[in-house]
Image (cartoon, rainbow, N blue to C red):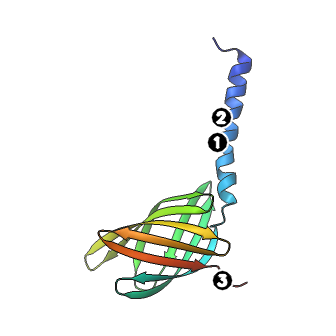
């Protein structure tokens, strides 16, 4: 049977682990604004990626002329990241699964879906 001390210590450790999650994400090198260029099957495409965190939840907003998309499953571990991007076009759509790596003020990522590959590079704008 657990003693009161064991229960208190277990509760404290669980709280620290839960509360520390957002702190680690807040230090993510991915947070902020990135100017990107993607090599798509129909040519090059420029976009702005904005990675934010609110209430411990990481989010990605993508601004790209003429393209509407929804991002889900954003994950960051150290300098690696991944997400899914659902793009709607022409009455249909495509969901790309991206994996990428951050190196300083640049990142590279590759999105894949149904035989399509989209290579994307990102750079932080000069301040």
Q: Quadrant of residue 101?
A: bottom right
Query: What's the CA distance linking mark 1 and mark 3?
Result: 33 Å
Q: Quadrant of residue 2?
A: top right
- In this view, the mark in front (1 or 3): 3
Q: Say whether marks 1 and 3 touch (CB < 8 Å).
A: no
Name the residue at 66% across, 40% down.
17
Query: What's the CA distance linking mark 2 and mark 3?
Result: 39 Å
Label 1: how many Cα within 10 Å (few below 14, some 14–19, many 20+): few
| Spot occupied by residue 70 in the image (x, y as percentages of width and height) | 42, 68
The residue identified by callout 2 is: 14
The residue identified by callout 1 is: 18
Q: Secondary structure at mark 1?
A: helix
The residue identified by callout 3 is: 125
Q: Secondary structure at mark 3?
A: loop
| Spot occupied by residue 111 in the image (x, y as percentages of width and height) | 42, 70
Name the residue at 57% across, 61% down.
80
């Amino acid at each position: 049977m657990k003693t009161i001390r064991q229960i208190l210590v277990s509760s404290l450790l669980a709280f620290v682990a839960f509360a520390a999650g957002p702190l680690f994400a807040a230090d993510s090198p991915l947070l902020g604004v990135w100017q990107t260029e993607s090599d798509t099957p129909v040519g090059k495409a420029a976009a702005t990626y904005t990675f934010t965190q609110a209430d411990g939840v990481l989010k990605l907003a993508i601004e790209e002329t003429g393209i509407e998309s929804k991002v889900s499953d954003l994950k960051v571990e150290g300098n690696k990241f991944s997400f899914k991007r659902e793009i709607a076009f022409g009455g249909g759509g495509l969901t790309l699964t991206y994996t990428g790596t951050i190196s300083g003020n640049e990142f590279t990522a590759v999105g894949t879906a149904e035989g399509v590959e989209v290579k994307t590079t990102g750079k932080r704008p000069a301040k």
